[in-house]
């Protein structure tokens, strides 16, 4: 049986002033999984993705990829390098 390549266990995120963005999120992905993240504005989609990429580590619970797995993240409003084409900027993420 395949191992999970990414696991979140009881993850929570609170931002000032004590606003709960994510609460008790648990999920796991098998190799080759395709995922989508849907929700209303302010529901925590970007926060969830930043946590998965390891960019946001100020969380409750545990979020970790399997050893050797890297999670890439391209922000909604990235700082682009004008000397590179689209592919070059995305590959850098």
Image (cartoon, rainbow, N blue to C red):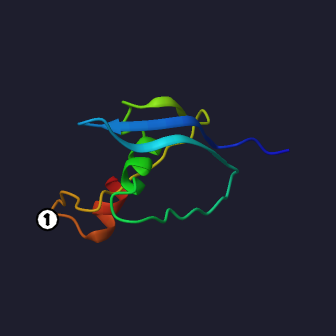
| Residue 36 percent location from the top left of the image | 54, 65
- Furthest residue to the front? 18
Residue 18's place in the image compared with 36, above or below, is above
Snapshot quadrant of residue 88: bottom left
Looking at the rendered structure, the secondary structure element under dot 1 is loop
Image quadrant holding the N terminus, namely top right
Tag 1: Cα neighbours inside 10 Å, few (<14), some, or many (≥20)? few
Q: Is residue 21 above or below residue 78?
A: above
Regarding residue 64, the answer to whether it shows in the image is: no
Residue nearer the viewer, 93 or 7: 7
Pinpoint residue 87: horizontal percent, then vertical percent: 33, 68
Residue at 36% over, 37% down:
14
Farthest residue in the left direction? 82
Residue drawn at x 36%, y 30% is: 58
Residue occupying the point 34% across, 53% down: 93
Say if residue 45 shows up in the picture.
Answer: yes
Q: Based on the displayed image, in which of its 4 quarters is residue 86 positioned?
A: bottom left
Between 66 and 28, which is closer to the camera in this rendering?
Answer: 28
Residue, disc 1: 82
In the rendered image, the residue lying farthest to the right is 1
61 relative to 58 in the view: left or right: right
User: Which residue: 75% across, 41% down?
Assistant: 3
Residue 52, percent from left and from top? 47, 44
Closest to the observer, 7 or 59: 59
Asked whether, in this view, residue 38 is left or right of residue 8, the answer is: left
Number of numbered discs visible in the structure rendering: 1
């Amino acid at each position: 049986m395949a191992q999970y390549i990414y696991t979140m266990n009881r993850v929570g995120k609170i931002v000032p002033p004590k606003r709960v963005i994510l609460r008790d999120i648990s999920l796991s992905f098998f190799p080759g999984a395709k995922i989508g993240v849907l929700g209303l504005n302010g529901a925590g989609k970007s926060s969830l993705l930043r946590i998965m990429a390891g960019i946001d580590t100020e969380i409750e619970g545990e979020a970790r990829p399997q050893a050797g797995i890297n999670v890439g993240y391209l922000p909604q409003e990235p700082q682009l390098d004008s000397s590179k084409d689209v592919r070059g900027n995305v590959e850098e993420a």
